[in-house]
């Protein structure tokens, strides 16, 4: 598949490097497909990018918690500096995510340049094909629920709760912006494929990544970390209900929606 | 799916044009289907934007696709209508041949002669 080593993607793939690619293909009902250095390299880059993206969200959650502690500390009733610092950090994390996406695109582009044959879809799989309506509705509902929680905390008379709600709002908007940026990159980045099998693998990776993006992390963590216990009892009860409903919904969603491999085959049939 | 082989002696724009034309003609690509943007397809296939642009331009000139401003390029219905008119004309011709008692071989020779001499002028619809 690849004719020369892929820059930024490590040394040329050996048999041991190809084993995870073979296992990945088997997991996705593509056992008949040959694991190639291209697939092995792309999976390795994807794994690194996923870890980096998880670190970015972890930094956001930790920074929000720190901003909450700082906003409440001291004798001054209103301290804008932690909120400004958190906003600046969110901007920095967005930039980091954008650089990460750029790095993945560049590695993909260089991998593609080594192929003598290139394959592409004639009907581009859009968000409805890659993400699917149920996951999109779930992501929108999760975001809306978290925003309602933040908005209702802002309406509480207690100034401490209101300050924490502002931190929650900044964190939620930042986390959602980062996820939206990742999703946009996922849908728009060029494919790297040389035949039907590698094109199918490309779609599977996109579907899996899109579904993973809609699994709430910041939306579920921040309300609990920042306001649970501090906010009134009704708010804490609503936050627990939101979390339990979300967990239930994602379990049903994962059980009922077709697998990423099935979705990929449907996409391949269309275009 | 579309595949471009860099090792092929056929230029990439012609490979792209021919595959698109074939998929439009055999209805793999339905009338009204939206094609990828030139820039996107160029990135997917690792081709220059001009290469894809040239293939799209030739398909547009052949009436197989149409560009609707910023909405993008779509599979045109013009080619489909043309084939339907040809099928109707062929059915009419077959009826005439049957009514006057000309055999099939001679009927085909008449059509071939008409096509070769350029006598087959476009029928008004």
Image (cartoon, rainbow, N blue to C red):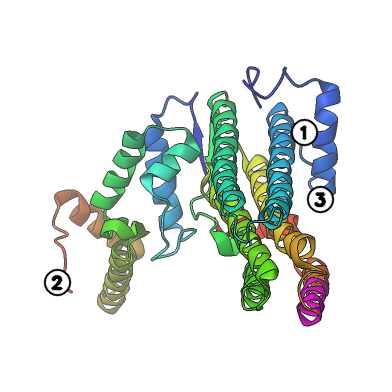
Describe residue A124's horizontal placement relative to residue A263 as left or right. Answer: left
Describe residue A255's horizontal placement relative to residue A127 as left or right. Answer: right
The residue where tag 3 is placed is A29
* Mark seen at residue A35: 1
**Magenta stretch bounds:** A233-245
The residue where tag 2 is placed is B124
- Residue A177 in the image, given as x and y percentages of width and height: 56, 55
Q: Is residue A54 shown to the viewer in this render? A: yes
In terms of secondary structure, where does tag 2 sit?
loop
Q: Earlier in the sequence, mark 3 or mark 1?
A: 3
Describe residue A182's horizontal placement relative to residue B69 as left or right. Answer: right
Q: Quadrant of residue A234?
A: bottom right
- Residue B45 in the image, given as x and y percentages of width and height: 48, 37
- Residue B14 in the image, given as x and y percentages of width and height: 37, 36
Magenta region includes residue A238: yes
Question: The residue marked by circle 1 belongs to what chain?
Answer: A
- In depth, the one of A80 and B75 nearer the eye is A80
Answer yes or no: are tags 1 and 2 on the same subunit.
Answer: no
């Amino acid at each position: 598949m690849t004719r020369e080593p892929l820059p930024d993607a490590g040394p040329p793939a050996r048999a041991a490097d190809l084993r995870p690619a073979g296992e990945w293909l088997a997991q996705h009902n593509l056992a008949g497909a040959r694991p190639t250095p291209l697939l092995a390299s792309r999976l390795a880059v994807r794994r690194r990018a996923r870890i980096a993206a998880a670190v970015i969200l972890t930094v956001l959650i930790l920074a929000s918690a720190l901003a909450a502690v700082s906003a409440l500390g001291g004798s001054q009733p209103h301290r804008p500096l932690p909120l400004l610092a958190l906003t600046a950090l969110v901007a920095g994390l967005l930039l980091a995510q954008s650089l990460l996406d750029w790095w993945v695109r560049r590695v993909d582009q260089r991998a593609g340049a080594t192929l003598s044959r290139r394959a592409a879809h004639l009907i581009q799989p859009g968000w409805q094909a890659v993400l699917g309506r149920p996951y999109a509705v779930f992501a929108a509902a999760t975001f809306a629920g978290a925003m309602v929680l933040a908005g209702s905390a802002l309406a509480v008379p207690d100034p401490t709760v209101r300050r924490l709600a502002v931190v929650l709002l900044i964190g939620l908007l930042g986390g959602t912006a980062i996820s939206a940026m990742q999703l946009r990159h996922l849908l728009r980045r060029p494919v790297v494929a040389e035949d039907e099998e590698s094109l199918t693998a490309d779609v599977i990776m996109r579907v899996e990544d899109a579904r993973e993006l809609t699994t709430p992390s910041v939306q579920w963590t921040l309300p609990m970390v920042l306001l649970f216990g501090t906010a009134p009892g009704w708010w804490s009860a609503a936050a627990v209900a939101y979390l339990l409903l979300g967990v239930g919904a994602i379990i049903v969603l994962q059980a009922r929606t077709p697998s990423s491999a099935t979705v990929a085959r449907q996409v391949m049939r269309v275009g | 799916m579309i595949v471009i082989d860099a090792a092929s002696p056929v230029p990439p724009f012609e490979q792209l044009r021919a595959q698109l034309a074939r998929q439009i003609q055999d209805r793999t690509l339905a009338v009204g289907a939206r094609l990828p943007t030139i820039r996107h397809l160029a990135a997917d296939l690792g081709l220059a934007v001009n290469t894809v642009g040239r293939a799209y331009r030739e398909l547009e000139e052949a009436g197989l696709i149409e560009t609707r401003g910023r909405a993008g390029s779509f599979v045109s219905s013009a080619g489909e209508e043309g084939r339907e008119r040809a099928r109707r004309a062929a059915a009419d011709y077959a009826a005439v041949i049957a009514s006057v008692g000309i055999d099939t071989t001679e009927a085909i020779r008449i059509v071939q002669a008409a096509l070769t001499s350029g006598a087959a002028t476009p029928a008004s619809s």
